[in-house]
């Protein structure tokens, strides 16, 4: 069971607690009949008299924001994260820690004390040093949480490729290959986001769902509509998720009712989104330049987008080499370019901040260019299987020194959980070995897939210095896992040791086992029971 703490709620208690010295209030919100407690909610504090015995709909915070993302008088922003008496928020978790390093894809640390001061990890030490640490740092007993031997802390999951606008189609419409699927199902769905009311209905639910599944960082594709993309920015900002948000750029080879009017409009609106996000001044949210993929963008558009990204030092995301017909189409559209990768490289779209989704059908030359330019790959195994796109050889990418992460690619992928992507990545790697064990003798291990889902994601979004594992100095983006949570799909036995418990969670666990989600030190999801 969860022991007495300021930051966790015991399974035997219905009473919300406060955040150590900062005394932040816990709110209870109802989301699709799942009760979730959110504390330090996106840095916004409600009035004192609103905090007692109230239940808020998840959209209530959103409703108190104007279209520019500014809070109305009923909300008070809290940016300094200190209590009324000026002391900082300290939390300490004692128990098992699981994370990745550059040297080791999975490290399991038992009997550790992890201290978080405001947003960052202050120390990781032996649990038996707790008294000394308390003397050194001055945190109260109430700041300490002792996890059971069936619980552990791990880094937050990073989803490097997800289409927020396709969420209405999750679990639907996967009976066609990619290019036909786009035209028949996906473009029509995305076109409906011209209606900002529809966007306001969908996007908050997307962020809620991904957070609930442990995604602390997401790289989102919105649509070609600027105003609805701003709504996604607001949804992310108010809910406290770390995210890259992109307005899709597309001016050709897409339906007349769903395309930008001109390259000029595309560039102007993309720059307007960058300005909008910058003006929010939320360190967790950034704009990302998002040419959909080469067939929908003429070369001058891609070149101007590359220049725009360089001027503002923004991330870039797009698709590449997802299917063989797509690769052939790109060759027809850009016959003067050496290959698909060269189209992007000549436009200035390959940088260390570039996320390339799929990357299944690559030549050796393309791999060398990607490695040299330090572009990263979002491996989307569920989508690749569902749309019959192909089997991505992740081992080959890693062999070339390319950064690799995982993406859910909803709605090509039917699940918004990176845990599902992790499992599918293992399946795909084993399928390659089954097909040709001589060429693929070493399929991915669970440990390696765990790194792809965490530290690998941080590397691909170029945030390894800030997130991705539980090292001192990094921001505390983390999950508290309880393998015996109410309704848990896991069966844990007395013989199971820490490695067994972690493995069972990665293969069989789900959102019911994720009892807390932290982003930058704030608990943004608290699963009540």
Image (tube, grey):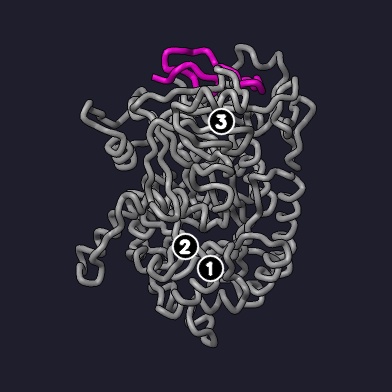
Task: Report if residue 516 is visible in the image.
Answer: yes
Q: Is residue 463 left or right of residue 95?
A: right
Image point (30%, 54%), residue name:
445
The residue beneath circle 2 is 403
- How far is disc 1 from disc 2 in space, using C-alphas? 7 Å
The residue beneath circle 1 is 374
Q: Secondary structure at mark 1?
A: loop
- How far is disc 2 from disc 3 in space, using C-alphas? 29 Å
Q: Quadrant of the C terminus?
A: top left
Q: Label 2 near label 1: C-beta < 8 Å?
A: yes
Of 500 and 491, nearer the camera is 500
Task: Report if residue 201 is visible in the image.
Answer: no
Where residue 520 sits: x, y (%)? Answer: 60, 38
Most frequent secondary structure within the magenta stretch: loop
Q: Secondary structure at mark 3?
A: strand
- How far is disc 1 from disc 3 in space, using C-alphas? 33 Å
Q: Label 3 near label 1: C-beta < 8 Å?
A: no
* Image mark for residue 215: none
Where residue 510 sits: x, y (%)? Answer: 37, 36
- Mark 3 crowd level (few <14, some 14–19, many ≥20, 10 Å Cα): many
Boundaries of the magenta span: 1-25
Magenta-colored stretch includes residue 318: no
The residue beneath circle 3 is 523
Q: Is residue 412 above or below residue 215?
A: below
Q: Is residue 418 left or right of residue 467?
A: left
Of 99 and 396, nearer the camera is 99
Q: Is residue 199 above or below residue 526?
A: below
Image point (56%, 30%), residue name:
523
């Amino acid at each position: 069971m969860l022991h007495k703490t300021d930051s966790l709620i015991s399974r035997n208690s219905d009473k919300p607690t406060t955040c150590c010295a900062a005394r932040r209030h816990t709110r209870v919100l109802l989301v699709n009949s799942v009760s979730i407690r959110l504390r330090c909610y996106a840095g916004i504090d409600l009035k004192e008299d609103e905090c007692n015995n109230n239940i808020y709909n998840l959209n209530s915070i959103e409703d108190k924001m104007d279209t520019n993302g500014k809070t109305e008088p009923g909300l008070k922003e809290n940016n300094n994260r200190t209590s009324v008496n000026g002391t900082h928020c300290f939390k300490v978790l004692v128990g098992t820690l699981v994370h990745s390093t550059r040297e080791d894809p999975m490290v399991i640390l038992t009997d550790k004390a992890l201290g978080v001061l405001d947003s960052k990890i202050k120390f990781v030490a032996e649990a038996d040093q707790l008294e000394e640490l308390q003397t050194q740092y001055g945190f109260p007993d109430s700041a300490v949480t002792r996890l059971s031997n069936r619980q552990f802390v791990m880094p937050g999951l990073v989803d490097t490729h997800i289409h927020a606008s396709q969420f209405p189609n999750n679990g639907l419409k996967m009976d066609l290959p990619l290019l036909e699927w786009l035209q028949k199902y996906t473009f029509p769905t995305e076109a409906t986001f011209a209606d900002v009311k529809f966007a306001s209905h969908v996007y908050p639910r997307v962020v809620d769902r991904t957070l609930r599944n442990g995604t602390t960082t997401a790289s989102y594709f919105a649509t070609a509509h600027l105003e609805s993309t701003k709504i996604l920015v607001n949804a992310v900002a108010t809910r406290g998720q770390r995210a890259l948000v992109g307005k899709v750029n597309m001016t050709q080879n897409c339906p007349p009712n769903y395309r930008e009017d001109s390259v000029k409009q595309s560039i102007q609106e993309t720059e307007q989104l960058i300005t909008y996000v910058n003006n929010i001044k939320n360190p967790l949210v950034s704009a990302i330049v998002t040419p959909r993929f080469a067939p929908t963008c003429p070369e001058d558009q891609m070149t101007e987008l590359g220049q725009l990204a360089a001027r503002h030092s923004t991330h870039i995301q797009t698709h590449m080499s997802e299917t063989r017909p797509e690769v052939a189409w790109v060759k027809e559209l850009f016959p003067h370019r050496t290959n698909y990768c060269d189209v992007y490289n000549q436009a200035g779209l390959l940088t260390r901040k570039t996320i390339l989704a799929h990357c299944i059908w690559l030549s050796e030359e393309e791999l060398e260019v990607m490695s040299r330019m330090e572009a990263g790959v979002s491996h989307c195994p569920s989508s690749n299987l569902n749309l019959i796109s192909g089997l991505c050889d992740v081992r080959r990418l890693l062999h070339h020194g390319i950064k690799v992460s995982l993406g859910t690619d909803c709605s090509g992928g039917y699940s918004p959980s990176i845990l599902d992507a992790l499992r599918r990545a293992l399946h795909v790697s084993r399928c390659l070995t089954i097909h040709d064990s001589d060429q693929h003798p070493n399929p991915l291990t669970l440990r390696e897939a765990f790194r792809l889902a965490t530290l690998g994601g941080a590397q691909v979004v170029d945030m390894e210095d800030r997130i991705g594992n539980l090292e001192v100095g990094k921001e505390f983006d983390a999950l508290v896992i309880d393998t015996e949570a109410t309704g848990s799909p896991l069966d844990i036995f007395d013989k199971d040791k820490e490695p067994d418990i972690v493995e069972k969670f990665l293969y069989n666990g789900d959102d019911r086992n994720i009892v807390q989600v932290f982003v930058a030190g704030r608990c943004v999801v608290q699963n009540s029971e």
